[in-house]
Image (tube, rainbow, N blue to C red):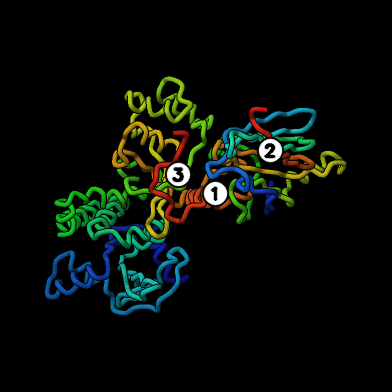
Amino acid sequence: MEVGQCIEVFNPYDWLPGHGENAVEFHAEAGDLSVVIAYDGPNGELKRELLFKRACAFYKTAFPGPGLLDLHCSVSSQVPMGSLIECPDSEAAVAWTRHWNDGRAIKHYSMTFLSENLQLLVFATDCVLKDPISSAS
Amino acid sequence: MGAALGGAQGAATGVTVDVNNRMLHQEDYNRLKEKCRGSNSAECQTIIRMAGVQSGMPMDDPSIPASKVVANYDADGNIVSYVLIDRSTNRPTIIMEPLDYEAYRNATPGMQAMMQLSPQYALDFASAGLYASAGDNGGAAEHVIAGVTSRDYVRDVVLGVAGAGTSSVLAARPGASVRGAVTDANFAQSTIRASETFSAEGAAKYSQLAGRPINTVDDLAAAINSGAIKPNQIPVDYVVTADGTKLILNTRTSVALDRAGIPKTEWYGANQTGVPVPNPTNSSSLVGKTFDDLAATQLKNNKLPATGTPSIPRGKK
């Protein structure tokens, strides 16, 4: 299935240090996918939660690594490599939306964690980036 | 360039013993051609044949962005050589026979830039490698002889840099791990995380090598010091930029090597210039991206200039 062009949702390096994230945790709960990103702040480690709402599918893989999915992309983009992206023309997202009888508009998200060497693919209705909190709290 | 390139491509794919591959800096070619007056040696026949009897117009080849290309033809209209014309100076820089031209245009811009700067004997060894891979051992031997009898090669042996000169060409082969390849490389990152931990993937790889848990930079440095892990088992990836700058991509591994007291001359480097970044989910933001782009991203995220930094990245120490 064709992934198509992408648009940038946000670039985490707007708030991450140059060396990137320290850790990434994944929690699937109540139909949502929670991704907690830990990173070095100016006064100790901070965490931010990236919440994918009504995530009907997600795939986490080591990066770099071989591909296992029936997805291909024929367009390149200038979006920075570590950004969260959305692919509005994704055929896979359309397939998921049809699966739900058009009751849920599913979006195709993808993000590469350059320091933790991970790549994440999520099909969800929406995503929200929460404010940073101290890792100690 | 279409028709001319098609002809060269055909010659390269249908390699026969008639396909020659001499590559020379233009000034060396001019010097040899002058010396070949009245000589009928095999090398002089090659040198004279490369001149052809007529030349085409300078043309663009998208695979060689830094130069224009002129094809030289023999009396039968066959292409006998190509000359690269530097776009900025408008001067000829390298003349090469069709097989070398194919290899050159398939090289990355960084590799092309290095070949422009390589001593002649390094180009001779590169040509020898092409001959050998094309099944022409006689041609390979001729170019090895041309390399080792070069005055520049003898001078560099005396100066102790010949190994570095030839290995810089060999090191450009993607993935090859070469000792000393990153001696003069800079870093694309200025810091590492405060915890100095590796990613889960990195920790798993190094733990397997050491036979004990390796989670942090200090763990890896201790394993190197004890001999449990040797530098050749942990080559660092690097890329060569268009201006010849080498940039190291594996920052935490580099810090561990440094902390273990291993001089950069003893590190092993794997050239990833022009190599596509594996993209397991076919993310649109990585389509067509190479390790060169990864280095550029690291530089930007670390607010470093295009040349990176020679300083060992800082951790908690």
In the rendered image, residue A88, in percent from the top left (x then y), is placed at 74, 51
In the displayed orientation, state which residue is furthest to the top. B212
Of all chains, the one bearing label 2 is A
- Tell me the residue that label 3 is attached to: B249
Of all chains, the one bearing label 1 is B
In the image: residue B29, left or right of residue B299: left
Q: Mark 1 packing: few (<14 Cα in 10 Å), some, or many (20+)?
A: many
Disc with the residue nearer the chain's start (1 vs 3):
3
| Distance Cα–Cα, label 2 vs label 1 | 19 Å
Q: What element carries label 2?
A: loop
Q: Quadrant of residue B31?
A: bottom left
> Residue B301 — which label?
1
In the image: residue A132, left or right of residue B236: right
Q: From the image, which quarter does the N terminus of chain B lie in?
A: bottom left
2 and 3 marks on the same chain = no
Q: Which of B58 and A104 is in front in this view?
A: A104
Q: Nearer the viewer, mark 1 or mark 3?
A: 1
In the rendered image, residue B218, in percent from the top left (x then y), is placed at 42, 28
Vertical placement of residue B264 versus B26, above or below: above
- Tell me the residue that label 2 is attached to: A132
Q: What element carries label 3?
A: loop
Q: Which of B275 and B315 is in front in this view?
A: B315
Q: What residue type is labelled 1?
A: Asn
